[in-house]
Amino acid sequence: MMRPMKDLALHALDAARAAGATYADARLARYRRRDIRTQDKRVNSLTDSEDIGLGVRVVADGSWGFAGSADLTNEGVEACAREAVAVARASALTRPGGKITLAPEKAQVSSFVSPREIDPFKIPVERKADLLLRVAERMLSVAKIRKTYGAMSFRGVHKVLASTEGTLAESDVITSQVGYGATAVGKNDAKSRNYEPPPQTRGYEIVREEDLLANAQRVAEQAVEHLQAKPCPVGKRDLILDPLHLALTIHESVGHATELDRVLGMEESLAGRSFATPEKIGNFRYGSPVVNLVADNTLEGGLATGGFDDDGVAGQRWDIVEEGILRGYSTSREVAPVIGQDRSTGGNRADHWSSIPIVRIPNLSLMPGRRRLTLQELIADTKEGIYIEGMGSFSIDQMRLNFQFGGDAFWEIKDGRITGMLKDVTYQSITPRFWASCDAVCDERAWVPNGVLNCGKGDPMQISQMTHGAAPARFRQVDVGGASETMKSYRAGGI
Ligand SMILES: [Zn+2]
């Protein structure tokens, strides 16, 4: 039988110290995954996996070293710790005189369990399949619908983190997701429509069966309507963006742009660095005064809410953009001191026991407007615009400045009324200009905590998740039409 996870973690620390580490942390993590995917009226994939392992991260000779192992015998744990120290010593040779300095942090002794009413791992696969197939049947009963998909994904992560500074923390987090979509096929065209309720760190209770069934026909009919929609106009339009669409815009143009490792040039893979450099903190106008973007890794049900990060720093809430002004970054204990910050915001996360933690976008949300405003009132107040729902394709440059976004569905607004659907809509802008054009955000009644489960970063790439809540918001006079060919779909992989 395996020794308790805490014992193994402490054993790894002893071995790392004995090998010469001046700092060490040991992360024992067990991952469970149950995914089901349907295509049309059949189940086309089932995933049922579980694995457990150890990651040991050390500082020795002033450099980082890391090693991971699935061998959780005493000998395996010791070998893993010794390898991490050997890697650190080898790394030190390439940067003589370099020294890792970590922002100080109190030892983290805590435990965290994500809220859950129904354990998704106890729901039989037949029940999940039955629901997705009933949804598919409803969508396929609509004429011109030729293809559908349905998906549910449940992940459980049980983690113990111990460090030579006295941290001994444990967490158990379940993430649940459900979604589906339909594709309508016409003469020379095919168009899709998707339904994706917010994924959350909660249980099977987020799978609201009645709601999923109730939306199936609407989704299918909108795919067909999308097929017959007018093409995107070219010119300037007022855009009203729904919360799910805004989740991707926030992610790409604010989230990645304010990861401090990117800002410092320490992370350049996957649309690289950032324009939001440290001298801009406190004075740079990122958006209009109605734009408040708040990071909150204590948000209940948030995809990045886990009690503490892999540096052992507790979840926090802080401003990234306050009344339009750039205020802060997402940091780790390593990068925070580089710009003189005395504490990490707690954003260092690894996607697996075999991965080293990297700076991650937190739960980062556009806060609701302070004045009472509904989506209907916002549409009624818009003369010539486009209302966009859902995530689509996107493209953004290496400095997180110039971008282009599509969407999942588009409606034309004329004189305060929706007049019909549009297709192939894209818009182009520059990050601060775009957020400066935001003149209204609906109030908290319309705020929805959407998020992403496939944020790709690092080399080799790691996948992480975070919530991006928003209420519908309006952006004035944005360039639409004239799509470039280089956009990528958010469904195609890491985003
Ligand atoms: Zn991302």
Image: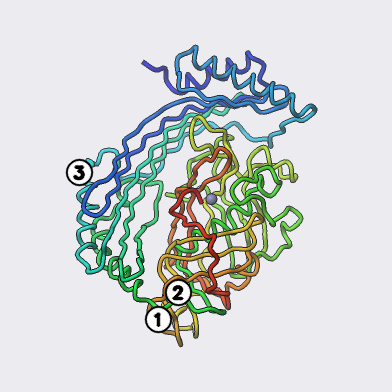
Q: Residue 73 in the image: x percent, y percent? A: 45, 14
Q: How is the image coloured?
A: rainbow
- Label 3 vs label 2: CA separation? 38 Å
Which residue is farthest bottom? Answer: 415
The answer to whether mark 1 and mark 3 are in CB contact below 8 A is: no
x and y percentages locating residue 476 in the rendered image:
57, 77
Residue type for callout 2: Tyr
Rounded to the nearest angstrom, the CA distance separating label 1 from label 2 is 8 Å
Q: Read off the residue under disc 2.
A: 387
The amino acid sitting under disc 3 is: Glu
Rendered position, 305 above or below 26? below
Structural crowding at the residue carrying mark 2, measured as other residues with C-alpha within 10 Å and reported as few (<14), some (14–19) or many (≥20):
many
Q: Earlier in the sequence, mark 1 or mark 2?
A: 2
Instruction: Using the image as rendered, state which of residue 234 and residue 268 is in the foreground.
Output: 234
Position above or below: 220 against 71: below
Instruction: Report crowding for label 3: few under 14, some 14 to 19, many 20 or more residues within 10 A (C-alpha).
Output: few
Which one is nearer the viewer's eye here, 51 or 27?
A: 51
- Residue 202 spot, x, y in % from top left: 37, 47
Q: Which mark is residue 295?
A: none
Nearer-N-terminus badge (3/2): 3
- Determine whether, in the image, residue 140 is placed left or right of residue 22: left
Q: Mark 3 = which residue?
A: 126
Labels 1 and 2 touching (C-beta < 8 A): yes
Compared across the picture, whether 189 is left or right of 373 comes to: left
Q: Residue furthest front?
A: 188
**166 left or right of 53?**
right
To which residue does mark 1 refer? Answer: 418
Residue under the point 62% across and 34% down? 106
Q: What type is the residue that disc 1 sits on?
A: Ile
Q: Which comes sooner in the sequence, label 1 or label 3?
A: 3
Instruction: Give the residue at x 57% y 75%.
Output: 478
Asked whether disc 3 touches disc 2, contact meaning CB atoms under 8 Å apart, the reply is no
